[in-house]
Image (cartoon, coloured by chain):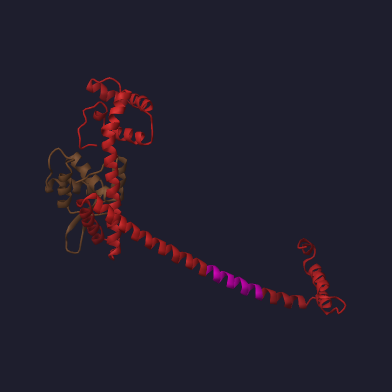
């Protein structure tokens, strides 16, 4: 937006204001809202006064859409590409074995970025997209590895739980065997297993046993 | 001191962070972008790079194993560039 000198009223406003106006247009602000907003700003009042211009009107906004705003959108898109290319270059420098913080990697990234910006947009985008796909593949693989490790860990936890359960059960048997009431129930020849279970439940768990029914 | 050149250099480097460039490459790219009213020289760019590094800490000088010097934006430089409207420099 600064490479081109705009002669319009809005085009001669300070860069920051034009930038914010474009951001607001991108966010979908209406022309009438923007006219009200702009004309309230002290910077706009001062600039227009210095230029001997009247307040901004809806037509000025409409004209700006097809000139400065259009250029701003083009520049915004190009800036996004540069950032994508910067990321691509840094990734390749890292993939080549470089420490991302190391001087060599950053210089290499600069040289690659230079090359990407020098070729036509289609070639650079194609290359950048191919690298992005490669990165995605690597990230997916890392994710799978992580999930696999998580499953292994869950298995291990389950094994430990089972082991703990077996040990606790045996310890309880030892403890209960010392309880005369328990031994009497188990030795009672007149009861079948269902009745023994019921009786043991009452002795060992008291009121809690009824909750399990 | 050339404020416009300094701002342009920082924008160029911040937009490409963390990539690093030699002063010569920065000069060439900025001149090619047409962002300045008149072309800058390597010496002028170097002077502004030194100022950006020493006074503002917005760029840093990197020296590789061969002794070649390159410049890169710092995170503080990137923040400053963003606050200043994130100007994009082509070229």
Instruction: Work out whether residue B57 can be spotted.
Output: no
On the image, which quarter does residue A23 sit in? top left
| Percent coordinates x, y for residue A88 in the rendering | 29, 56
Above or below B65: residue B18: above
**Observer-nearest residue: A193 or B27?**
A193
State the quadrant of the N terminus of chain B.
top left
Q: Nearer the viewer, residue B74 or A10?
A: A10
Magenta span: chief secondary structure: helix
Q: Is residue A161 magenta?
A: yes
Q: Position of residue A130 (x, y in %)?
A: 31, 58
Residue B33 appears in the rendering: yes
Residue A190: name its quadrant: bottom right
What shade has chain B been given? brown
Residue A58 against residue B46 in the figure, above or below: above
Q: Position of residue B83 (x, y in %)?
A: 32, 41
Q: Is residue A66 left or right of residue A212?
A: left
For the point 26% across and 41% down, which residue is it?
A75
Above or below residue A113? Residue A212 is below
| Callout count | 0
> Quadrant of the rendered structure where residue A39 is?
top left
Residue located at (66% from left, 75% from top): A166
Which span of residues is magenta-colored? A153-166
Which chain shows up in red? A
Residue A160 within the magenta-colored segment of the rendering: yes
Q: In this rendered view, identify the residue nearer to me: A57 or B78.
A: A57
Q: Could you say where residue A202 lies in the image, as x and y percent from the top left? A: 81, 67
Q: Is residue A140 above or below residue B8?
A: below
Q: Residue furthest right?
A: A190
């Amino acid at each position: 937006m600064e490479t081109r000198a705009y002669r319009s009223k809005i085009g001669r406003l300070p860069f920051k204001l034009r930038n914010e106006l474009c951001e607001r247009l991108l966010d979908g602000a209406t022309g009438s809202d923007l006219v009200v907003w702009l004309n309230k700003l002290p910077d706009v009042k001062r600039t227009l006064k210095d230029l001997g211009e009247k307040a901004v009107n809806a037509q000025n906004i409409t004209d700006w859409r097809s000139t400065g705003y259009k250029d701003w959108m083009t520049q915004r898109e190009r800036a996004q590409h540069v950032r994508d290319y910067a990321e691509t270059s840094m990734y390749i420098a890292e993939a080549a074995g470089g420490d991302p913080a190391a001087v060599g990697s950053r210089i290499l990234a600069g040289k690659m970025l230079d090359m990407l910006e020098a070729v036509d947009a289609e070639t650079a985008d194609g290359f950048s997209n191919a690298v992005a796909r490669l990165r995605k593949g690597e990230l997916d693989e890392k994710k799978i590895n992580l999930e696999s490790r998580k499953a292994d860990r869950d298995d291990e936890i389950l094994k430990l739980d089972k082991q703990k359960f077996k040990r606790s059960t045996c310890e309880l048997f030892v403890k209960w065997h010392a309880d005369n009431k328990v031994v009497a129930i188990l030795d009672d020849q007149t009861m079948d297993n269902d009745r023994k279970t019921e009786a043991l439940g009452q002795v060992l768990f008291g009121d809690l046993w009824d909750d399990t029914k | 001191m050339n404020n416009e050149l300094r701002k342009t250099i920082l924008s160029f480097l911040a937009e490409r962070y963390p990539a690093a460039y030699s002063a010569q490459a920065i000069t060439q790219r900025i001149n090619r972008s047409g962002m300045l009213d008149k072309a800058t020289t390597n010496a002028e760019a170097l002077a502004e790079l030194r100022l950006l590094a020493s006074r503002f800490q917005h760029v840093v000088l990197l020296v590789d194993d061969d002794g070649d010097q390159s410049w890169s934006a710092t995170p503080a430089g990137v923040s400053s560039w963003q606050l200043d409207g994130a100007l994009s420099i082509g070229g």
